[in-house]
Amino acid sequence: MSLASRVASFSAYRKTEDHLTTRTLSGAIVTIVGVLAAATLFVNACWDFNKTDVVQQMVVDSARGETLSARLNVSVLAIP
């Protein structure tokens, strides 16, 4: 059995009876490309979900007058 016939026998979309379908190399290629695209999107979404973004921002509101109250929120996760 050649490599092309082995690849053509792979199909994820077989819903009908065998005598009504024809396995083709192009159908197998579409199946493999679709699975690879879905896996790539899934891994990228998981990586993006678990990524931590550190945002440092300081804004001074000068419309309040001359007094300025400053509040700092400092989180220390681990101290040896």
Image: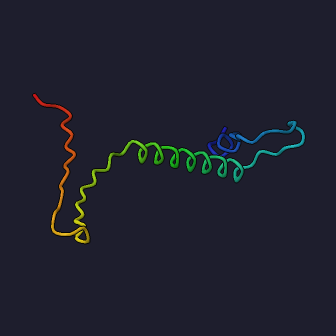
Q: Nearer the viewer, residue 66 or 14?
A: 66
Q: Is residue 44 left or right of residue 4?
A: left
Quadrant of residue 18 within the rendered picture? top right
Residue at image location 39% in from the left, 42% down from the top: 50
Residue 46, placed above or below residue 69: above
Q: Residue at x 20, y 69 (%)?
A: 65
Q: Nearer the viewer, residue 9 or 74?
A: 74
Q: Residue at x 21, y 34 (%)?
A: 77
Closest to the observer, 9 or 54: 54
Query: Measured from the top left, where is residue 70 in percent x and y?
Result: 18, 55
How many callouts does the rendering have?
0
Residue at x 22% of width, y 70% of height: 62
In this rendering, the answer to whether 59 lies above or below 52 is below
Q: State the image coordinates of residue 20 (x, y, percent, origin top left).
A: 89, 42
- The image shows residue 73 at horizontal and vertical percentages of 22, 46
Query: Which residue occupies the extreme top position in the image?
Result: 80
